[in-house]
Image (cartoon, rainbow, N blue to C red):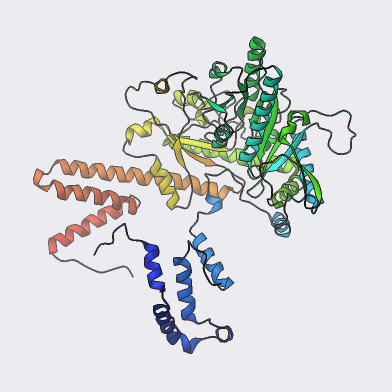
Amino acid sequence: MTLSTHLDADFIEEEIAGRDGGSRQDVVNKFTKMNHANQSKRSRQRKKEHPGSKVVERLAGIAKKYRIPEQDMDPELAYELVHDELALDGTTTLNLASFVNVHLDEWAQKLIDENLTKNLADNDEYPMMIELQNRCVSMLADLWHAPIDASKSDSGSRTRAIGTPCTGSSEAIMLGGLAMKKNWQQRRRREGKSTEHPNILMASCCQVALEKFARYFDVEARIVPVSKTDYLINYDEIKPRLDENTIGMFVILGSTYTGGFESVARVSEILDSFQKDTTIDIPIHVDGASGGILAAIAYPELKWDFRLNRVKSINTSGHKFGLTAVGLGWVIFRTKEWLPESLKFQLQYLGGLEESFSLNFSRPGCQVIQQYYNFLRLGRAGYREIFDNCLISARILSLFLEETGYFRCVSNVHLPRGVSSSIQSSTSCSAASSFGSLDLENHEKFNPALPVVSFQFSAEFSRKYPEIPQSTVSKMLRNKKWIVPNYPLPKTSIPLPGESPNAEIPAQTGKIANNEILRVVVKYDLRNQLLDKLMHDIVDVVEVLVGSVEAMRANVSEYKTHTEGAQQQIGEKMVYDMLLSLAKDADPRLLKQKKEITESHDKHGHISFRGTC
């Protein structure tokens, strides 16, 4: 009988394990009897630890995985159950989809182990941990050129900034957005105006946390479409979306799609012009989740931070290019005055007086300790060396992909400053051949961006092999343990407020262009050997797909030469050969051998069951 998809596997497991004592004991007795002669001294010393009972207990533990068990379990067995299931996860080093750092040196790991149970909310109990937190805030404020308080002495922080650690950039963005909303409300009340219908601007390439802020805190999200040239914010579309109810604007320093930086300076100039025309002052929050630390160190001449007066707050993720373990974000406000008093809380808790302005309370403090360790251990020079390696590797990968002819890069980290991927693709030449020998280490000559490589099938490849779905590359790379996502690009056309939603969809003529990209985030642990392996595997996957298509085309040609009566048989053979070509990596020798064996069997009328040795 064929197994049906509606069968409940968990129910079957429970039946095998035995839900009543009788059947369970039968299984226990069977295993106990079989293994009685081989019981070890350790097994005899431990009550109820028969080999048979452990097997059944293991199966029962798996079957009842959605309920807290009634009885306790041997800790080693519990560990094995959890450990074995987690073995099915992907390898963190080969996860090229995520921006999250996965590298820890032994000394950072030691500090984490020593401080794993410390609660960051307990200021009075762990004063030195809070001191390290304050030092990190000061270091980031200094890195981002926060205004100096001339009244302060040279000892300690001299900036006027204030900040806090968060569980990640999502929480940090919420706090930055809340500060803009509260300040807007206060200003409107002073002017005797309505505080209803606030709105905030962000590009369609924004991370979902930005839209979450708008939805969770009742702010209209006015989405600005991205440009077709670089898939970053379309600057011409900003002004028409501004009005007196605009509380602020999120500007993205490091798109999750292409890694490109939106020009904070250019957005600031647009808002300056709008203020000159209307007297409405609109602040900027910079979403530097991935780019906040990297941009400050790798592109020090780039003005995007507190050097621009309109920038009121910045967030970053310590667990991305701050190189900490996952679970740490930071938000820094330009001055203490910008953070409204209504967002601050003074709490008497666990023996001390705490001033808080975070959304969370109890949380681990070990990531903050690791962040301070990283700042000490690496310094600007150490971070610069790591970021240099990441950016150079991203440029090498980009140039390699374009040289294959299979792909074009949508990201522009490998292109000379001011040149976009669309301009490059229109020349029908690769970056390497168009711009000659560039100094890959000189970041000033290239577009400022994260070490991200976003790529898609080239137009020539798609014309030659239209049958190949680009998403198949992602799936087949997963079979080689690489995690490389394939997903749609952000929208380049969005209606203005009040326009019909139909205005969002332009009329399509002819074949729809490829709107999907594959993306690789080049992180600290993607060393040269792994990068070389990745490049080979990408080419191998494409060649397998090409071989499969060509085999399928040959079958189609053969199919067309047969009569109507043989269509079903030939159709089945087409599908079989296509799947076989994928299983055999499209090796024509194996396909030819399989065909010869099949023809031989047909000729002699017998089947061989001989297997491999």
Q: Nearer the viewer, residue 127 or 192?
A: 192
Residue 367 position, x and y percent, is: 69, 50
Relative image position of residue 112 (x, y in whole percent): 70, 56
Considering only vertical position in the picture, is 143 above or below 53? above
Work out whether residue 400 or residue 454 is closer to the camera in this orientation and state it. 454
**Position of residue 141 in the picture relative to residue 37 (left or right):** right
- Is residue 147 found left or right of 30 in the rendered image? right
**Is residue 443 in sight in this rendering?**
yes
Q: Quadrant of residue 308?
A: top right
Observer able to see residue 294: no
Left or right, 158 with reference to 362: right
Q: Position of residue 538 (x, y in %)?
A: 45, 45
The quarter of the rendered structure image containing the C terminus is bottom left
Residue at position x 65%, y 21% in the image: 282
Picture layout, residue 214 above or below residue 559? above
What residue is drawn where x is 55% and y is 44%? 98
